[in-house]
Amino acid sequence: MSDHNSVLIYLDTNMYSRPFDDQTRPDIREEANAFLEIIRAVKAGALTLLCSDILMFEVHNILSHAKRIKVEDYLRLCAEHIDTSREVLELGRQTESDCRIRARDALHIASAVLGKARYFISCDKRVTQMRQARCYRRLGRSYHREYFSVMNPLLFAEKLRKGEYR
C-alpha cells in the first residue's frame, strides 16, 4: 500500500525500458535520465508506482532476455497493482474509441485511471499530446478522479524538481 504522503503514478512500458534503449540519441538519453530521477523519488518515498496486468504482459513479452530482467527489477518497486477487470476493459475500449489511441495504450490509461493514479507518464508522443490528454482527463472525471494528468517524463521530472507534482 502506498504512503499517504506520496503521489501515485503510473509509468507505461516504454518508460521502464527507456534506460535500455539507444542512449546515443539525445532525446532518449534525456527521457532515460528523467526516468531515473522519477525512480529516485519513488525510492525516497515521494512517489508510489502503480503496476497493472497490461504492464506485466508487455514486460513479459520483451524479446531481449537481458532487457526484460532489468525492466522487471524496476517493476519490483511498484507498491500497488490493479488487476484487469471488466471495468478496466470497458474503460479501455471507451478510451481507445473516444481518444483514438491503440488498444494497449488505452488499457494502460484505463488501468491508471481506475487504479487512482494521479499521473500517467509515457515517452510515447502520440499518447501524451494535449488533445489526447484532455480526452483522458474527461474520461477520468467520469470515474470520479479529481485530478488525472498525462505527460512525458521530461515535464514530470521538471514538476518533481519544482515540487509541483502534489
Image (cartoon, grey):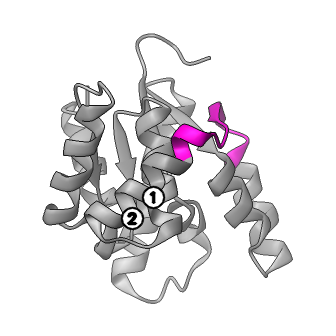
- Eyeballing the image, is 36 above or below 43? below
Mark 2 vs 1: CB contact within 8 A = yes
- The answer to which of 135 and 129 lies nearer the viewer is 135
The numbered disc on residue 150 is none
Instruction: Please tell me whether residue 135 belongs to the stretch shown in magenta.
Output: no
From mark 2 to mark 1, how far is it between C-alphas?
Answer: 5 Å
- In terms of image quadrants, where is residue 154? bottom left
| Mark 2 residue element | helix
Specify the amino acid type for callout 1: Arg
At 26% from the left and 33% from the top, the residue drawn is 142
At 20% from the left and 67% from the top, the residue drawn is 129
At 30% from the left and 49% from the top, the residue drawn is 157
Q: Residues within 10 Å of mark 2 (few under 14, many from 20)?
A: some
The numbered disc on residue 93 is 1
Q: Residues within 10 Å of mark 1 (few under 14, many from 20)?
A: some
Q: Residue 80: image x %, image y %?
A: 62, 29
- The answer to which of 77 and 107 lies nearer the viewer is 107
At 85% from the left and 75% from the top, the residue drawn is 65
Residue at the farthest top position: 4
- In terms of image quadrants, where is residue 31? bottom left
Q: Residue 3: image x %, image y %?
A: 51, 13
Q: Give the residue at mark 2.
A: 96
Image quadrant for the C terminus?
A: top left
Q: Residue 23: image x %, image y %?
A: 50, 82
Region rendered in magenta: 75-88
- Eyeballing the image, is 162 above or below 61? above
Specify the amino acid type for callout 2: Glu
- The answer to which of 111 and 72 lies nearer the viewer is 111
